[in-house]
Amino acid sequence: MPPLANKQIVEQLSRSKIYQDYEQAFNRATGLPLKLRPTEIWQLVQHETKYENPFCAMLSQHNRSCAACLEVQQKIIDAPTTAPKTVTCFAGLCDTAVPVKTGEKLIGYLQTGQVLLKPPTKRQFARTTKQLLEWGLQVDLKKLEEAYFHTRVLTPKQYNSMISLLTIFGQHLSFVCHQILVQPHESEPPAVTQARRYIADHQTDELTLTEVAKAVNTSTFYFCKLFKRTTGLNFTEYLSQVRVEKAKDLMPNPQLRIGEIGYQVGFQSLTHFNRVFKRITGQSPTAYRAKLPHFKPS
């Protein structure tokens, strides 16, 4: 998926009720900020959020220290992995990013932090202010010190446990991502909502972009751009998502073989079904079915 699509998908996930409910619960339970962000960023992730660390907020007002914070965020994405990654800034604060994927594609991160893993000390603050002064920052050191010593402190064990919970949510968010992507939202253009309904009603047919555009009374060119801009997916990607979601609904039925499920949801060959299912979910249909609770082959 191109970066623009990743950004659009993350925006849709951020608007979902499941994410907003979790973000609110996380903020209240930890006192820390949380942001679902795409892989590409050009600004401070937690800036001007309700739970932003006051010390970090003060530094963000100055170009050189802001640049240092951006460098920390860049370290997170320089070597993307499938596991959470924690980095520490020059002031000793930690930031962590948990990968969020759709199938095998990395689309963004759940990012939190701005936290100390041991109580702040006068010596540590002195080193921090020395660096800031060397950068030429003009800042109220009394207010900065007060903010620094009010930074949230967690033990490494507490912080790691919190990241483990965040990782579980990231995995859950990856799982429901496909369902969220095929659901309409209130602000989308009527033509896109109509197209979603038409695709859902005819997903087993050999649908084409031209056919769907005609069904919603738009030109193919205009519909193609509008649909991609609204959903974050092109027509083919979206149709595949719909078919895979339907296939997942049929998986618990032991009377249906994998090949039968593929044909029922609109795939014309078992090979194509296997390939698309794995690309979207990160596992083959057989592996996915084997992990279903209480599934027993007939």
Image (spheres, rainbow, N blue to C red):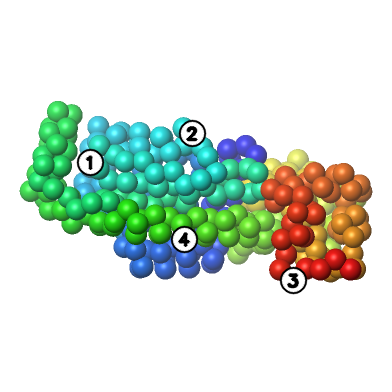
The correct choice, above or below, for 167 with respect to 4 in the image is below
Mark 2 crowdedness (10 Å alpha carbons): few <14, some 14-19, many ≥20: few
The correct choice, above or below, for 103 with respect to 31 in the image is above
Asked whether, in this view, residue 112 is left or right of residue 83, the answer is left
Image point (67%, 56%), residue name: 178
Q: Nearer the viewer, residue 123 or 136?
A: 123
- Give percent across and percent down for residue 104: 65, 44
Amino acid at the residue labelled 4: Leu
- Give percent across and percent down for residue 203: 84, 57
Mark closest to the chain's N terminus, 1 or 3? 1
Whether residues under marks 2 and 4 lie with C-beta atoms below 8 angstroms apart, the answer is no
Asked whether, in this view, residue 227 is left or right of residue 99, the answer is right
- Give percent across and percent down for residue 201: 84, 63
Amino acid at the residue labelled 1: Ala
Whole-Å distance between the Cαs marked 2 and 4?
A: 22 Å
The dot on residue 294 is 3
* Residue beneath disc 1: 91
Mark closest to the chain's N terminus, 4 or 1? 1
Amino acid at the residue labelled 2: Ala
Mark 3 crowdedness (10 Å alpha carbons): few <14, some 14-19, many ≥20: few
The dot on residue 79 is 2
Mark 4 crowdedness (10 Å alpha carbons): few <14, some 14-19, many ≥20: few
Which is more foreground, mark 3 or mark 2? 3
Q: The C terminus is located in which quarter?
A: bottom right
- Give percent across and percent down for residue 213: 80, 50
